[in-house]
Structure formats: C-alpha cells, structure tokens
C-alpha cells in the first residue's frame, strides 16, 4: 500500500485532500492521471450498462434533496454506524472495528491511550446542512449518502417521459457523502466518494432471475476494467447484517493489501424504496406493465459500484515489479481501455531538429484522434520508457532516423518491453480501439 500511495501521489494520480493545510481526513484529490483513469472507468461502466442496452435510462440528479427523501428511505432513522468514545482521551472509534456492536459496552481498550470506552451509540453518517438563509428544521438537507435516492425520486419522471416496460433500469454516476467515523486505507473508506449505480426494476416474481443476471454482469464489469478475477470473491451477506432495505445482498470482495474487503455490492431492494416514497410523497410510483393489468409497484435489483474502491482495486491489480534488461522496474499493467495515457510519442534525440519535427508531426496528427497521448523528449529513451511504465502507458512510439527514410516507427510494448517497427499509418489503428472511439 505504501508503494501504491506514494506512486499515486508522485505521478499525479491521487493527492491527499487539502494537503497544504494539513489535509482533511477521508478526502482525496485526483490529479490529471487520476481524473483520466476515473473517467475511463466511468466510460466503460456507462457504455456497458447504459449505452449498449435498450432497457436503461441515465439520470444525473441533484446531490441536495428534500429532507423527506431521506426520512422516507430510512436513512435519517437508520443510516448509522456504532460509535464508542474513549472515556480518557475522548477519541472516537467504530465499535465494530474494535470490539463488536453486539456488546453493550465497547469491548477492549482504547488503541490510542488504553482508556476504557463508554456505551455504544448510533452515529448517523449523513452530512447535514441547511439550504437557503434560514437555519431551521425546515431548511435541513443532507449531502446524499447514496446516488440511489436520486434514481427512486425520478422513477415517475422516467415512466412518464419514456413509458418503459418492465424490466428496465435507471442508472446514475455521481458523488455521495458519508461522515465515516474512521476513514482509512487510502481510497477504501472515504467521506466523499463517487458511486455508479443501477436500480433495475422488475416484476416482483422475476427478481431472482434478474439478480442472477446482474451477478454475472458485476464480473463482466470487473473483467472489462481489468480487476484480477481471481482476487474478487462473492460473500452472501447473512440476515441481520444487510442494509435495512435489502432482502438479499451479495458483497463482491477484493483481496486488498489490507485484507479481503467489499469492492461493490448487489442488493435486492424489493419494493421498499418505491413503496416508501409513494407513501411519504403521495405520488403514484407504480407502472401498468401490460394492457388491462392492474398497476404494480416493481421490485428492484441494485448493483452498486464505488469508484474509489474500483480505482484502488485497479491500482492493486495493475501494480507490477519485474526485471527488464537486467534492471528492476515498476509498472502499472493497466488494461489499455482504462489506461490514462494510451501512448507516448518520442523523438529518439532531442537535439536533432529533423527527428523532432517528424515526431511533432506524428504526435499532432495522432492527438487529433486520440487526445490521451503524451509527448516526451526528456532524458534518454530508457528513462522515458520507465516513466511511461510507471503510469501504465501501453505503447511508446519512437521516431528515429529510419522513420525519415521509410515512414516506420518503433512501437514498444509496456508489458514485454519488445519493440516492433510499424508504419505511421498503422498507429491510429493500434491506439484508437482503446479510447472508446
Ligand atoms: N446504494 C447502495 C449502497 O450505497 P453500499 O454498500 O453502502 O450500498 C455501495 O455502497 C458501494 O459504494 C460500496 O460497495 C463501495 O464500493 C462504495 N462505498 C460505500 N461507502 C464507501 C466509503 N466510505 N468509501 C469508499 N467507497 C464506499
């Protein structure tokens, strides 16, 4: 983990949030390569679950919502973690991480000072705020703790605008916020995160079939972005440990360096949310699925992916150390579809104007089609290769003296270090398939 966190910072993927002020716990800022990586992940997800399907509707709902949304969904009453406070040093911990929520008193001693704990109490994880100038109960709002809320309140809008038949899904990618008691493990547990969620609405009798389909699709996505299949494991979440809205949940866990932990989840939310919002708002949240049939409240299957954990699992899956040409090197073996930079273009020598001019010409032409390419003429070729390896660039294109004679360049493969001569006209075909063009 230390190596990953340091590489991520040094090479411009991820920085600690508010760093020059000493940071803000549970927040991270994405640098240029981190943004590109995240966008590529989101694009793979959106293509797979929205654009390539006929039964999916995308939304981008407001983060701030009427407080009644979160009352109806059960989050005001129940979105909490068990908290204990040390009587001596007053530090706070999640009870289940140091003793277990089943005990009335926080078990064990304070890991910081050895003091004893007070009673376990429930701590609501939603960030509360006020909307507008008046700071009273009526202006209370929350930063959404899951993107799902924005989907359920738009169910009626989608039905009214598009008249879908069951099954159909509504998808959203966006920020969510959780005031975690103990943010930790780099991107794993943060207070500001992004989720990619689908609420897939089905006839109540068909939930099991849809659940099984989405179970496979979760792996289709983790495979597509390049998360090691062997490191992802299903965990059937037992009764009593599921979220309040779920009748069945599978957590997909990943072998992170700090242990096997949840990467993403699949839940059967029944009609819990639509029924609760219909009751609280008075809106009709049902659908006439077949002519002449009575309206039904669909049941809902929810695959939910967190971007931070996906980024972390990808970094862990991609991080590789090997020996190449007698030297040890570190490289990120990203799947080219998610690699932030698709190719780097180099003139062999910086001080040969004819090579630089030709390289610039090739770079400029390629960049029009494939924006995610880099120019590098700094240091010797070996150093440039290492720099690209470290950020996971799949191909390095070098313009040399032979290029001027026969219009070929060398294309060097990140993983094997092998070089091939290819014609300039073939370059777009090598790189563009990984850009979603
Ligand atoms: N709408 C369902 C839902 O929010 P969840 O299991 O609480 O379910 C879904 O969260 C996913 O969001 C998790 O599997 C994880 O990837 C991500 N996630 C949740 N809390 C997180 C946190 N504090 N830090 C990073 N990712 C988080």
Image (cartoon, rainbow, N blue to C red):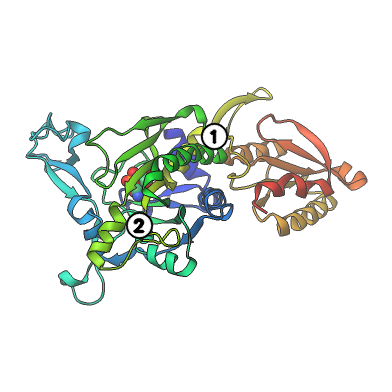
Q: Which residue is outermost to the bottom? A: 133
- Specify the quadrant of the image occupied by residue 175: bottom left
Q: Nearer the viewer, residue 128 or 109?
A: 128
Q: Nearer the viewer, residue 311 or 8?
A: 311
* Horizontal and vertical percent position of residue 17: 37, 52
Q: Which residue is outermost to the right? A: 405
Q: Is mark 1 within 8 Å of ligand 1?
A: no
Tally the marks.
2
Give the label, 1 or 2, closer to the camera. Answer: 2
Mark 1 vs mark 2: which is more N-terminal? 2
* Horizontal and vertical percent position of residue 335: 60, 39
Please say if 294 is above or below 208.
below
Residue that numbered label 2 is attached to:
296
Q: Which residue is depicted at the point 67% across and 38% down?
A: 385
Residue that numbered label 1 is attached to:
318
Q: Which residue is depicted at the point 11% across and 32% down?
A: 103
Disc 1 residue crowd, few under 14, some 14–19, many 20+, Cα 10 Å: some
CA–CA distance in space, label 1 to label 2: 46 Å
Q: Which residue is depicted at the point 18% across and 72% down?
A: 138
Q: Which residue is depicted at the point 43% across and 65% down?
A: 159
* Horizontal and vertical percent position of residue 100: 17, 32
Left or right of 70, for residue 34: right
In what quadrant does ligand 1 lie? top left
Please say if 365 is above or below 316.
below
Q: Which image quarter holds the C terminus? A: bottom right
- Specify the quadrant of the image occupied by residue 73: bottom left
């Amino acid at each position: 983990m230390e190596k990953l966190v340091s590489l991520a910072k040094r090479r411009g993927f991820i920085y600690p949030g508010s760093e020059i002020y000493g940071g803000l716990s549970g927040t991270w800022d994405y640098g240029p390569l981190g943004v590109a990586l995240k966008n590529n992940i989101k694009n793979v997800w959106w293509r797979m679950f929205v654009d390539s399907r006929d039964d999916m509707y995308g939304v981008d709902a407001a983060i701030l919502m009427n407080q009644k949304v979160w009352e109806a969904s059960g989050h005001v009453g129940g979105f909490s973690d068990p908290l204990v406070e040390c009587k001596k040093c007053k530090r706070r911990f999640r009870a289940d991480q140091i003793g277990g929520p089943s005990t009335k008193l926080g078990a064990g001693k304070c890991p910081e000072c050895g003091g004893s704990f007070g009673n376990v109490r429930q701590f609501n994880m939603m960030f509360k705020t006020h909307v507008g100038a008046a700071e009273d109960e009526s202006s209370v709002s929350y930063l959404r703790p899951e993107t799902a809320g924005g989907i359920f309140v738009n169910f009626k809008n989608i039905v009214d605008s598009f008249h879908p038949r069951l099954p159909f899904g509504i998808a959203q990618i966006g920020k969510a916020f959780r005031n975690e008691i103990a943010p930790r493990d780099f991107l794993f547990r943060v207070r500001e995160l992004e989720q990619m969620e689908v609420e897939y609405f089905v006839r109540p009798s068909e939930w099991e079939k849809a659940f099984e389909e989405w179970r496979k699709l979760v792996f289709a996505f983790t495979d597509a972005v390049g998360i090691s299949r062997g490191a992802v494991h299903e965990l059937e979440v037992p009764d009593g440990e599921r979220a309040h809205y779920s009748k069945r949940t599978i957590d997909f866990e990943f072998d992170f360096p700090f242990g096997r932990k949840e990467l993403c989840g699949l839940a059967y939310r029944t009609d819990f949310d639509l029924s609760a919002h219909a009751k609280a708002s008075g809106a009709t949240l049902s659908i006439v699925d077949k002519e002449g049939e009575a309206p039904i409240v669909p049941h809902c299957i929810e695959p939910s992916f967190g971007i931070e954990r996906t980024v972390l699992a990808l970094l862990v899956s991609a991080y590789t150390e090997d020996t190449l040409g007698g030297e040890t090197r570190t490289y990120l073996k990203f799947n080219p579809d998610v690699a932030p930079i698709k190719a780097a273009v180099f003139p062999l020598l910086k001080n040969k104007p004819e090579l630089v001019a030709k390289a610039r010409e090739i770079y400029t032409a390629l960049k029009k089609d494939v924006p995610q390419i880099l120019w590098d003429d700094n240091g010797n070729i070996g150093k440039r290769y290492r720099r690209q390896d470290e950020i996971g660039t799949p191909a390095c294109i070098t313009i040399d003296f032979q290029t001027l004679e026969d219009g070929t360049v060398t294309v060097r493969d990140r993983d094997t270090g092998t070089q091939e001569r290819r014609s300039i006209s073939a370059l777009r075909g090598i790189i563009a398939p990984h850009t979603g063009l």
